[in-house]
Image (cartoon, rainbow, N blue to C red):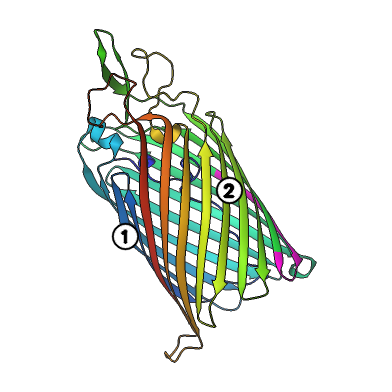
Amino acid sequence: MAATDRLRPGVGGLTVLLSMASPVPAATLPVDNVDVLYHRYDGGGMVIDGPSVLVRKSAGPQVSLTGQYYVDSVSAASVDVLATASPYTEERTEYSLGVDYLHEDAVLSLGFTDSSENDYDAKTVHIAVSQEFFGGLSTVTMGYANGWDEVGMVGNDGFREDADRRNYRLGFSQVLTRNSLLGLDLEVITDEGYLENPYRQNRYLDPGDATAYLYQPERYPDSRTSTAVALRGLYYLPYRASVRGEYRYFTDSWGIEAHTVELAYVHGLNARWSLEGSLRYYTQDAADFYADLFPYENSQTYLARDKELSALSGTTIATGAVYEWKQTAIPGIQRLQFSLLVDWLSFDYDNFRDVTARGDYLPGEEPLYSFDAWVTRASLILEY
């Protein structure tokens, strides 16, 4: 299955593109550390899990090097798959290399990522510059990334299609008071080339039988431009706690508009333990060329039945605990942090119907689809 079925930023809202930075000077290099993560997503007939290992190491006072290894093992028996195909398993492997260079009040970052699976290969290069002003109270960040994807198809060695992706970012953060920080981020993404999934199909009414439907391959436009704007604020409370709020607006040239609102809270129990929780709500409109059921074959130029392009809404409740041990007794380790975070996601689709539901339903009268999912992340960070 092509990686376009993955939980991607933007459509679906399962991934937050931009994270809130803590109010510390931007013009510092990341500390030397090893970060080991295990992640697991389980819901909607999909199980995605695997490890991630990230290593940072300084090479002098101005240069920091980064290497990361990341694996996704996928077992898929989702409603999309069961409707037209059989359950499948696959594995995606990703390697990343990066370098950060510090010069006075600015940090220049360069990176390369190579991701591969049995029918999808992606390569991305990125560059970013972060500049402090006014003694570290204001920070401006600019970034650019260029990706080259190659889409294949299991069982068809001659099928090869390309997609180019460009990402532009501009961010601004401002320290308002000693306890508060405000951030504003703008992101523009342009995609060109083969943007659909070669396995996915849409359905249309059977012209010879009003109680049945047939399938045909999806067809997407060969270009897409999306824009996201995020406003977030962070406030440190006087009793070892902080609260964070965020609003994000997303729109694209396919007719999708999405809104995300999130509120998060972190509470320190003592010098080593802290608890955190968050609540997020997401909603989006459908793409202009989406339909759950088309009236007849080739009824329009572009045809899509991907549920992530339909109208939907979702709620995420997250909680977790973090243990931090500074100046440890472990030789060579200055700081140790362990965290266990769990998210519960619930999504309801307004115009995508579950064709696998049991019952004698006429086309277009099947129950609307909904699903719940759990996301678990366990990580260990060692600073040295």
Indicate the secondary structure of the residue bearing disc 2: strand
* Residue 367 position within the rendered picture, expressed as x and y whole percent measured from the top left: 33, 29
Outermost residue to the top: 208
Q: Report the Cα–Cα distance between label 1 and label 2.
A: 29 Å
Residue placed under numbered mark 1 in the picture: 50
Front residue of 26/150: it is 26
The residue that appears at 44% across and 55% down in the rendered structure is 113
Disc 1 marks which amino acid?
Gly
Picture layout, residue 81 above or below residue 377: above
Residue placed under numbered mark 2 in the picture: 261
Q: Main secondary structure of the magenta part?
A: strand
The residue that appears at 62% across and 63% down in the rendered structure is 243
The residue that appears at 72% across and 64% down in the rendered structure is 132
* Residue 377 position within the rendered picture, expressed as x and y whole percent measured from the top left: 39, 63
Picture layout, residue 294 above or below residue 221: above
Residue extent of the magenta highlight: 167-180
Mark 1 surroundings: few (<14), some (14-19) or many (≥20) residues within 10 A: some
Front residue of 7/160: it is 7
Disc 2 marks which amino acid?
Val
Answer with mark 1 or mark 2, whichever residue precedes in sequence. 1
* Residue 60 position within the rendered picture, expressed as x and y whole percent measured from the top left: 57, 78
Indicate the secondary structure of the residue bearing disc 1: strand
Q: Check residue 178 for magenta coloring.
A: yes
The residue that appears at 59% across and 72% down in the rendered structure is 29
67 displayed left or right of 248: left
Picture layout, residue 172 above or below residue 243: above
**Label ID, residue 238:** none
